[in-house]
Image (cartoon, helix red, strand yellow):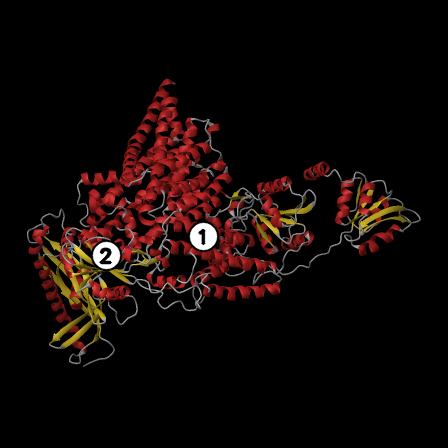
Amino acid sequence: MQQNRINETHQVSPVNAFFIVTGSQIVVNILKFQSVVTEDAEQDAWISVLLMGLGTLLVMWCILRLLNNEQNYGQPDLFSIHKRFFGSWIGNLLNLAIILYEALGAILYLRAYIEILNVWLFPRLSPLGFAAIFSLLIWTVVIGGFRTITGAFFLNFIYLLPLYFINTFIFSDAHFSNLLPMADHSMADLSNSLIKASSCFLGFESILFYYPFIKRPKLAVKWCYFGLLNTTYTYLLLTIQGLVYFNIGELRTLVWPVLTFWKSIHFPLVDRFEYIGIIYWLTVLIPNVSLGAWIVSRGVKQIAPVIKQKYALVAFLLILTAVCAIMQSRPQIEWINALISHIGFYLVFVYIPFLLIWQWLLKIKEGKSQ
Amino acid sequence: MRKLLNIAAVPLLFLGGCMQDNIIDDILMVEAEGYDYIGNDQVIGTITTPNYAQGGVSGSGGGGGPATASMMTSASAITYDGRSLVEKLTPEGQKAIRAGKLRVQLFNEALLRHGLKKLIHFRNQDPDVGRDLFLVMVDGNSKDLLQSTYQTAIPVSRYIYDLIFQNQQQNYPRSNLSTVLYNYYGYNTDPFMPIIKKEQDHIVLTGIALLKRDQYVGRLNGQQEAFLLKTLIENFNYGFYDYTFKPNQHVVLENVNSSRHYDVKNGNSAEPNIYATVTLKGYVRQGNPLLATQDYYSEIQTGIQSEIKRALEKMVVGFQKMDVDPIGIGDIARSYTRHFDERSWPERYPRAHFHAKVKVMLVETGISNVR
Amino acid sequence: MFWKKKNDEAMKEDQGASPKTIEDLLLQLKKSPDFSHYQHLSDTFQCWISFFSSLVNVESIHRDILPFLYKGNIRSLSDIQEQIPIEKIERTNDLKLIQSKLMEGCLIIQEKESSPKSLIVPTVLREGRQVQQPEIETSIIGPKEAFVESLDTNISLLRKRIPIPQFTVEQSRVGKVSNTRVCLTYIKGIANEENVNTVRQRLQDLEVDHLFDASTLSLNISDNNGSPFPQFIDTERPDRTAAALFEGKIALLIDGSPNSLILPTNVVEYFLASDDYYTSWYFATAYRLLRLFAVAFSVFSSAIYVAILTYHYQLIPIDLLGSLITSRSVVTFSPMAEAIVLELMIELLREAGARLPTKVGQTIGIVGGIVIGTASVQAGFTSNVLLILVAMSALAAFTTPNYRMASAIRLLRFPIIVAAQFLGLLGVALCFAFFVSHLLKLTSLGRPFIEPIYPLRISDLRDSFIRFPFTMQSERPMFLRPNDTLRYNKERVKQKAGKREPDIDE
């Protein structure tokens, strides 16, 4: 058990759990968030968002419980858990599935961003070229280990702070009566919105993989919850901002409402903020794709210890570049997005509680056999 | 390995970098577009681009060749409704034409009667253009208006933009692409836009065009009516209202600070009641020698109150007759009614009762006293 | 000591040609005209004396040594050792030691010319610059002393500021051929032992043949030699060095170098001037923020100009558009080409100014700045707006107090400008991300380089972007992991502050 421990020089302090959790939730989907979440619940979407935030807190409780219990048996990450729970064969098969999910997630982030770049900034930007440059960047980050990825997450949080103030620009155009009448929708509408919102809340489950890299994990617990609360707050703010600035009819026509909102923001030297905003979003992408690449390459090493993580990383980045170049149109991207959202939803809200129960059953069995 | 990858980065930059550039002095930036309907789904489209370098560069000393002066400043062509003018007019452009800095779009009345649907959808879809451009109706011909010369030397696009912007700070309700899209896509609200007119070597803002969805149905004339519409649409600060208390005797209420509040009763019934409370706070600068200072706070205040109240109610009845809803009464009713019946609203709207309540507060009357 | 043994072994291996016996050595040295070697003959005693007249203090030899040799009671080398009024006289048989001491400026006294048995009398000539005002890191207020080339003077400058026995100076020799003296100084009890050991280890492991300056040493022992950013600060100010020592850092002094090397450091320290500590905290903060803004401006301004003018015309406010287009319209080059031309011109001016004698340099500055600038705009080479931007960013780059950091920042511009040409603002952002990911991985003596920012240490932020009042800086920087974390007793500061809170008119 002890030899499995991560060297302390590669670990990060507990506070960083906050930055990673909140940073891995706010990715490219947030730009589409407002039109997705208001589709059913309309002006009451903020209730769905709040409920979803509470749901993530519950799941986080499950995850932390699962990982904390697991510390007594081996390395507390999902790869080791799978191997312990289901044996080497099935466990590795599940690990492979998880790796595929994470890999698809990372690819989707990058491809969705390239799509935005193509639509707004550079219609002729080749996905292959950009993905190749970006992969190189990811390589320089991941090669520095988990500490560097955490640093990227932290800087990402700092960079995003000014964006919280952007919302003050809506006051001249705000229609606060759009939020009325409150609680006017059925439970069915609310829960539909809630499920649709879930795809934007996903990402925090990656703590299943980096948990062993957090020093004194007991102290990190509260930061994990704060991270989720910060995300919920951000999404709540965004929902209200979207509802107040646009109306429902307009939201239904928009693909990226956040960017459309940024279109009407001016600064003394910047006439159109969305161009800056899109570029700014690069800083969101870097840590998230890095984390994805790190998880994938680490998973490969866990399944087949012969392969060194750095070679697995290079292989994954090559695949990332290739797949980004192959995906050509929005329907393909949307299809993968839907796929990921579905898998993610079941992974987070069904599979993780199931794992916790399984762990409990194993413990009872163990107790009996003694 | 590390070095190899770093060296590999250089050609990668070229790979990603085969992109179309828009060097600012090598493109023509469209700042105004005009559309005139000529029937049968055909329009005459006109664009203007400002010519920055007409006078050459001061201090250039003749070096570097002639400035890129005398470039195309306007062009027009016949095309079908809803087509991007940039692409249509490319054959006329000396350099590539780009629409990213579009400021004003003009339409003549015929096009507005025909319907703006295709253009509005196009604007909502296009990421290139900002959301603060003005959509404007032209009394007369927009091609004429754009291609004439005026007293001012600044480009006509900027002239129109400044004119409308300045007026929307005061009596005219805010209307740009953002609000037009808001009202067009919103349920039970209708967009409106300012009307301009060419008068000799001037451009004049004459009123507000009312659109039912995307089609012109009527207009409000002059800034007085614009002021009334504005009090119902937004809270604002710098309006002014001209009150005629006797024939040919005026008092002007200035720096009006206006705020509004709505209430809806029986929003789902056949004849809903809408209550609007408008509070105006203002100064009198331009008074009248016939009035003692004391009178302002009694007679004039109540006079303005009742006049505005009557005018507001009359205006809304007018809207109901035209079946147009620039104020967004439908949206107000939705906000204040639980389980609002959105489907039957268009039938109920003409029968709705609108009640205005106006409070006017005179704050100051200037630095002299009349007894 | 270990280092010595290692050095000696290295010498034996590599310098086969070096003299094997004392006779060989003397024979080799006699060829130099400044080498004096003669037999001293008195009634009671005879010996061989040898020294380099260019290295020794001849006056002291004539005054303190030679007269004593004629005294009757001197019969052997040990008599000399006892009677000459000079301290630290050594007796040795070691040929290597004799050789190195001779080269340092000691006087060697032998009984027989052929025997290595000898006495080493230190008569080193202390000759060099006087302590002068700092020239690179000038300050308006505060001490006006700078290090000089003499190691001993430099140590005395530090000792004067740190008059405690815990101030430790460890001497070692670096450079296979040059054998340069390097002093590792720190305050025992404050500095982290681990850091001291790391530095010691790195000095031992250093493989160079000669060493002239602190910056060379810094380049040789830094954590990542391939990085464009310096990881250790070289400073010519003894007050700054002493302040660093008080914080728990380590300073290296090199013989022949007017700079000391401070280590470890974090990135913020490169933008701190010593003036910051001599003015009240809000001025200090304001100027610090100005300097940081200047860094950002000088790195990004011309690249952003290129990016926006080439790709993102939508971003430019309409009122600015006119003046940008008019100033660009006569320019024949693309925005990138004109930016590169201007940046190169500024770099040329700077390089010419640095290489030319001071008086000529000033003329060059005026000629370059005024004549070339205006002429290039008139000739249609560059636009007015860019000229302003580039000149300002050059100016901004020079606000960075550390010269090596300033040069790094100036050079960072060029890749960013190229990236801006290819990918617009996206290229700028990508380049920035590359630099940031590099900085994230960088360490200084094993400590994270961008420390108060990541890993986030609130207590260290108190002396970074904002310089908080001294009463609030009771802790030493955390990233150094000092042995003694507190500078002074925080409670007593509070007690003192508590007294000074009377009511109105009391």
| Secondary structure beneath label 2 | helix
| Marking on residue C430 | none
| Secondary structure beneath label 1 | helix
Q: Residue at x 30, y 58 (%)?
A: B93
Above or below, comparing residue B91 to residue A310 in the picture = below
Residue sitting farthest toward the top: A369
- Callout 1, which amino acid? Ile
Please report, as a chain letter, where disc 2 is located. B
| Marking on residue B177 | 2
Residue pointed to by mark 1: C417
Residue C97 horizontal/vertical position (percent):
76, 42
Image quarter for residue B107? bottom left
Residue A46 horizontal/vertical position (percent):
24, 45
Please report, as a chain letter, where disc 1 is located. C
Residue sitting farthest toward the front: B91
Above or below, comparing residue B294 to residue B322 in the picture = below
Residue C263 horizontal/vertical position (percent):
57, 47
Residue B248 horizontal/vertical position (percent):
13, 77
Q: In the visual, does B318 lie left or right of C401?
A: left
In this orientation, does residue A15 appear? Answer: no
Residue sitting farthest toward the right: C43
Which one is nearer the viewer's eye here, C451 or A15?
Answer: C451
Q: Nearer the viewer, mark 2 or mark 1?
A: 1
In this orientation, does residue B67 appear? Answer: yes
Q: Quadrant of the C terminus of chain B?
A: bottom left
